[in-house]
Image: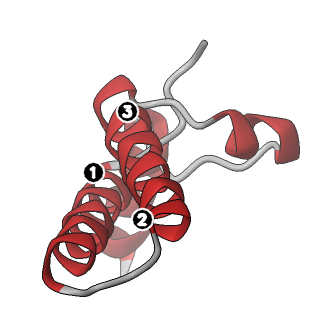
């Protein structure tokens, strides 16, 4: 599967996963909800490490910039 997650997206996913894990650890929530939050946190971490999100792929979304896009932005800014 092609990578479709950019650096900022990876950082956001890891931060959200840490927040969920801290929430589970610090609050008294039902075990079912804790399991759901834990699984969601693990999915966020796994997709961040893998660099690919199946939901993004299904909708054709990518947050990863390729070098051609960066070059176009650089050229556009250089002309102004």
Marks 2 and 1, how far apart in space?
Answer: 28 Å
Q: Which residue is mark 3?
A: 46
Circle 1 crowding by C-alpha within 10 Å: few under 14, some 14–19, many from 20: few
Q: Is residue 5 above or below residue 78?
A: above
| Residue drawn 47% across the image and 47% down it | 39
Task: Name the secondary structure under disc 3.
Answer: helix
Image check: 16 left or right of 73? Answer: left
| Residue drawn 27% across the image and 72% down it | 24
Where residue 14 appears, as percent x and y from the top left, is 24, 57
Q: Is residue 10 above or below residue 54?
A: below
Q: Quadrant of residue 13?
A: bottom left
Image check: 34 left or right of 56? Answer: left
Q: Which residue is mark 1?
A: 7
Q: Is residue 40 above or below residue 21?
A: above
Q: Are marks 2 and 1 in contact (CB under 8 Å)?
A: no
Task: Name the secondary structure under disc 1.
Answer: helix
Q: Are marks 1 and 3 in contact (CB under 8 Å)?
A: no
Name which of mark 1 and mark 3 comes first in the sequence: 1
Marks 2 and 3, how far apart in space?
Answer: 18 Å
Where residue 42 appears, as percent x and y from the top left, is 37, 42
Disc number for residue 20: none
Q: Nearer the viewer, residue 35 or 50?
A: 35
| Residue drawn 31% across the image and 51% down it | 10
Q: Nearer the viewer, residue 68 or 78?
A: 68
Marks 1 and 3, how far apart in space?
Answer: 14 Å
Q: Which residue is mark 2?
A: 34
Name which of mark 2 and mark 1 comes first in the sequence: 1
Task: Name the secondary structure under disc 2.
Answer: helix
Where residue 60 appears, as percent x and y from the top left, is 80, 42
**What quarter of the picture does the N terminus occupy?**
top right
């Amino acid at each position: 599967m092609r990578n479709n997650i950019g650096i900022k997206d990876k950082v956001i996913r890891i931060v959200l996963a840490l927040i969920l894990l801290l929430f589970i650890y610090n609050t008294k929530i039902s075990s079912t909800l804790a399991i759901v939050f834990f699984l969601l946190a693990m999915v966020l971490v796994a997709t961040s490490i893998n660099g690919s999100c199946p939901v993004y792929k299904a909708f054709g979304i990518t947050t990863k910039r390729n070098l051609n896009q960066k070059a176009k932005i650089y050229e556009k800014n250089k002309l102004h």
